[in-house]
Amino acid sequence: MAADRNATRRQVFITGATVYMGSRLAAELVRQGHRVAELVRLGSEDKLPANCAAVVGNALDRSTFQDKLGGAQTFVQLVGVAHPSPRKAREFREIDLKSCEESVKAAVASGSVSHFVYVGVAHPAPVMKAYIEVRTHCEELIRQSGLNASILRPWYVLGPGHYWPYLLKPGYWLARQIPGLRESATRLGLVTIEQMVAALVRSLASPAVGIEVLPVSKIANQTR
């Protein structure tokens, strides 16, 4: 990612930075010279990657962090229920949707944020309807905000602790050989955590003008 190292360094605010994807993204951004501040709960400051600034607050209440964005130009929203499943519909509404609402409002009110980055989900799909509904609602909130935004739409993300989807690879290969299934197999394909982080970093280094949507096919083309 040599091109990214030469890009303009940015000031970035991340919610959900202490978990699976966020911790890896934060570490990579710091490595590339970006200034990173991360929203954390009280007592979780030591979970942050080195050289990241901790902002203690509650992702479900913007009043706890709205005035602490520190002039961030990019806001990355990664808060969400861990290990999504159909039985977590209520949690999706109470955590994923609420945190996105608060983050979008905080970003708009900041006066400094010019680029919003969000990880949605590939759709349509035959399963995870509640999850897709909430994530789609979040995308609409972002569109209505007037912010420039990059929206990534992965399906399954492969990586440490998330290996079981590898069992689906033979089925995906077979589906891509069948014309009637090829499009959905591509749209709902597998990406790696490395590809996700690379796509997020590239989105940040080259901020969207308007709304940019990155489906699985574009995420999968990212390398580090």
Image (spheres, helix red, strand yellow):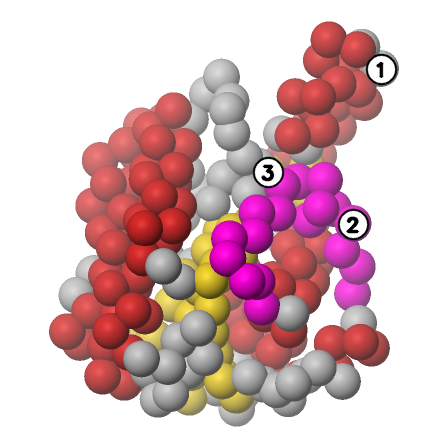
Question: Residue 214 appears at what percent x and percent y?
Answer: 62, 47
Q: Which residues are magenta?
A: 207-224
- Rendering coords of residue 17 (x, y %): 44, 69
Instruction: Residue 207: name its quadrant.
Output: bottom right
In the image: residue 144, left or right of residue 26: left
Residue that badge 2 annotates: 221
How packed mark 3 is, by other alpha carbons closer than 10 Å (few <14, some 14-19, many 20 or more), is many
Inspect the image, locate mark 3, and give the three-letter code of the amino acid beneath it. Tyr
Mark 1 closeness class: few <14, some 14–19, many ≥20 residues within 10 Å: few
Residue at position x 51%, y 29% in the image: 123
Q: Please tell me whether mark 2 sits on a helix, a strand or a loop.
A: loop
Which kind of residue does numbered mark 2 sit on?
A: Asn
Residue located 25% across and 55% down the image: 101
Q: Looking at the rendering, in which quadrant would you find the N terminus? A: bottom right
Q: Does residue 142 appear in the picture of this structure?
A: yes
Q: CA distance from mark 3 to mark 1?
A: 20 Å
Measuring 65% from the left and 85% from the top, which residue is drawn there? 8
Residue that mark 1 sits on? 177
Which structural element holds mark 3?
strand
The residue mark sitting in front, 3 or 1, is 1
Give the labeled residue for mark 3.
156
217 part of magenta stretch: yes
- Gap between marks 1 and 2 measured at Cα: 20 Å
Residue 69 picture quarter: bottom left
